[in-house]
C-alpha cells in the first residue's frame, strides 16, 4: 500500500466530526449553491445506498433516480428534490451509524444537516403551514391545552373518531395517529413547594423538565425524580423554562430557535456554573443542548457551558454506579424487557447506558431494539407521513412480538406510544424510571 493510500485509510477511520451550522452566512441561503451541493451529495448517496432502510428519505431519492430517463441524479427533475428533504426528520442515524463518507472523509457528506439547510431555505422563502407552525409551537399550545376544561375537551376529541376526521380535514393530522394526552395537573403544579434532598453528602443535578414532561407526561418526570431521590441525588428544577427548540429546529425556523436559546441558556448556565450536571427526561432535548445549539452558536459561551454540563439521565446514573454510589438493592426482577433505544439518544455516542442500568436488576433480560420507530415528534402524526412511519416502526413491533416480552419501553415516550399503538396491548412501561421503581419496590 502506498504512503498516500495509507494516509487516506487512516483518515477514513477517524470518528465522525460535525461542522458548525453556518446559518448566519449569506452563502447558506443561496439557492444555487445549495442546489449544487444537494446534487453532489445525492449522487454520492445514489452510488452507495447503505442507508436505504433507515427512513423514507432515501427510498424517495432512489426511486426518483431509478425512474429518471438517465437512471442517474442528473435525470431527476430538480423540482422533485424537496420530496426527499420533506422525508428527512433529522434522526442523524445515517450520519452516525451508516455513512462512510462523513467528515473527516474528503467527500464531506452530512446528509441530515444538508436536509436541514433545505428546510431552512424553504422556511425563509415561504414560511410554514398553519399546521406545522402550531405543532412546533409547543409552549403556546401546551399553555392553552393544559387549562383544566380545555385539556378534558382536547383529550376527548383526540379519542373521538369523528373529531379526528374533522381535524384531519382541517389540519392534515392523520386520524389514526396516536396523540399524547394533556394534563392540566402539570408536573410543575405537582412539584410546587417540593424541596430537593440537601441533608448529608449528596450530588445535585439540574432538571430541564421539558414541555412534554411538564404537560404530557408528568408521571415520567415524577418517576425520574423518585429514582434520583432514592439514590441521594438532589434534583433542582430549572425555573421558567421554554421549549428546547428542537421542533422549530426541525422546521428550519432558526430565528425561533435563537429566541428560545436566549430564554433558556442563561438560566441553565447558572446551574451549570454551580457545579451541577444538567439533564432532561426526553433524549431530543438533551441532544439539542449537547449538539445542535453548540453547532448553531459556536461562539456563545453560555451555550458551551450548558452543553458541557448536559448528560443523559442514565449516563449520569451509570457514572454514579461506576463510582460506587448507585443503590443496587433491588427487591424484584423485571423479567424480559424489550428496550427501544431512540435515535436522538443513540447519536449522542454514549453507548447503551439505559440497558446497562436495567441489567443491574437481578432476573432481568434486556432485548435491545436499535431501530428508529419513525415517530420523530410531529412526523408520524401528519396525514402524508403516517403510513411511512408505520412501515419504519414495523420491524420494532415485529421483534417485540417475536420475543414475547414482559415489558417494552423506550427512552422516547412518543416512540413508545407509537409502538403500543401498533401492538395494542398493555405491556408498555411508561418509562424506564417506572420499571426501576418497581424493581426497587418504591
Image (cartoon, grey):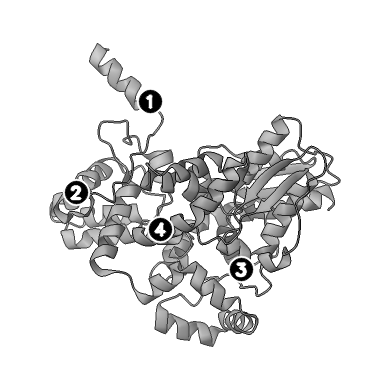
Query: Which numbered marker is on residue 257?
Result: 4
Vertical comparison of 7 with 200: above or below: above
In the rendered image, residue 248, in percent from the top left (x then y), is placed at 41, 61
Answer with left or right where residue 86 lies relative to residue 320: left
Q: Which residue in the protein does label 3 denote?
A: 215
Q: Quadrant of residue 397?
A: bottom right
Per the model, the C-alpha gap separating discs 2 and 3 is 42 Å
Q: Which residue in the protein does label 1 denote?
A: 13
- Quadrant in which the N terminus appears: top left
Disc 3 is placed on an element classified as: helix
Vertical comparison of 384 with 391: above or below: below
**In the image, which is nearer the foreground, mark 4 or mark 3?**
4
Per the model, the C-alpha gap separating discs 4 and 3 is 21 Å
Q: Which residue in the protein does label 2 denote?
A: 39
Vertical comparison of 360 with 221: above or below: above
Q: Decide: marks 2, 1 in contact (CB < 8 A)?
A: no
Disc 4 is placed on an element classified as: helix
Disc 1 is placed on an element classified as: loop
**Residue at 70% of width from left, 53% of height from top?**
224
Q: Earlier in the sequence, mark 1 or mark 3?
A: 1
**In the image, which is nearer the foreground, mark 4 or mark 2?**
4
Answer with left or right where residue 206 lies relative to residue 77: right
Amino acid at each position: 500500500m502506498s504512503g498516500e493510500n495509507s494516509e487516506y485509510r487512516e483518515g477514513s477511520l477517524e470518528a465522525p466530526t460535525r461542522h458548525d451550522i453556518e446559518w448566519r452566512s449569506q452563502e447558506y441561503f443561496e439557492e444555487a449553491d445549495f442546489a449544487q451541493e444537494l446534487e453532489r451529495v445525492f449522487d454520492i448517496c445514489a452510488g452507495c445506498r447503505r442507508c436505504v432502510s433507515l427512513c423514507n428519505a432515501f427510498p424517495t431519492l432512489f426511486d426518483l433516480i431509478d425512474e429518471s430517463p438517465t437512471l442517474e441524479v442528473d435525470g431527476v427533475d430538480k423540482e422533485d428534490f424537496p420530496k426527499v428533504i420533506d422525508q428527512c426528520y433529522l434522526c442523524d442515524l445515517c450520519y452516525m451509524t451508516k455513512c462512510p463518507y462523513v467528515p473527516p472523509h474528503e467527500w464531506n457528506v452530512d446528509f441530515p444537516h444538508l436536509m436541514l439547510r433545505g428546510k431552512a431555505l424553504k422556511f425563509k422563502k415561504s414560511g410554514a403551514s398553519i399546521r406545522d407552525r402550531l405543532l412546533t409551537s409547543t409552549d403556546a399550545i401546551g399553555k392553552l391545552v393544559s387549562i383544566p376544561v380545555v385539556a378534558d375537551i382536547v383529550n376527548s376529541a383526540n379519542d373521538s373518531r369523528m373529531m379526528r376526521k374533522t381535524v384531519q380535514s382541517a389540519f392534515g393530522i392523520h386520524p389514526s395517529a396516536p396523540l399524547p394526552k394533556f394534563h392540566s395537573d402539570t408536573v410543575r403544579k405537582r412539584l410546587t413547594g417540593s424541596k430537593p434532598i440537601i441533608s448529608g453528602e449528596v450530588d445535585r443535578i439540574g432538571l430541564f423538565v421539558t414541555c412534554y414532561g411538564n404537560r404530557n407526561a408528568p408521571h415520567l418526570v415524577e418517576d425520574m425524580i423518585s429514582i434520583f431521590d432514592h439514590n441521594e441525588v438532589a434534583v433542582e428544577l430549572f425555573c421558567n423554562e421554554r421549549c428546547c427548540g428542537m421542533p422549530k429546529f426541525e422546521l428550519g425556523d432558526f430565528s425561533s430557535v435563537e429566541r428560545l436559546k436566549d430564554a433558556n441558556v442563561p438560566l441553565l448556565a447558572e446551574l451549570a456554573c454551580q457545579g451541577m450536571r444538567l439533564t432532561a427526561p426526553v433524549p431530543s432535548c438533551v441532544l439539542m443542548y449537547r449538539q445542535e445549539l453548540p453547532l448553531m452558536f459556536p461562539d456563545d459561551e453560555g451555550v458551551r457551558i450548558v452543553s458541557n454540563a448536559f448528560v443523559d439521565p442514565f449516563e449520569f446514573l451509570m457514572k454514579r454506579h461506576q463510582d460506587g454510589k448507585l443503590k443496587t438493592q433491588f427487591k424484584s426482577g423485571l423479567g424480559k424487557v424489550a428496550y427501544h433505544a431512540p435515535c436522538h439518544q443513540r447519536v449522542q455516542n454514549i453507548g447503551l447506558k439505559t440497558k446497562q442500568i436495567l441489567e443491574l436488576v437481578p432476573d432481568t433480560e434486556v432485548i435491545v431494539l436499535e431501530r428508529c420507530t419513525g415517530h420523530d415528534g410531529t412526523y408520524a402524526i401528519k396525514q402524508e407521513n403516517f403510513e411511512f412511519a408505520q412501515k419504519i416502526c414495523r420491524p420494532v413491533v415485529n421483534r417485540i412480538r417475536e420475543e414475547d416480552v414482559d415489558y417494552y419501553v423506550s427512552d422516547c415516550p412518543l416512540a413508545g406510544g407509537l409502538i403500543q399503538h401498533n401492538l395494542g396491548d398493555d405491556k408498555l412501561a411508561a418509562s424506564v424510571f417506572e420499571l426501576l421503581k418497581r424493581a426497587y419496590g418504591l
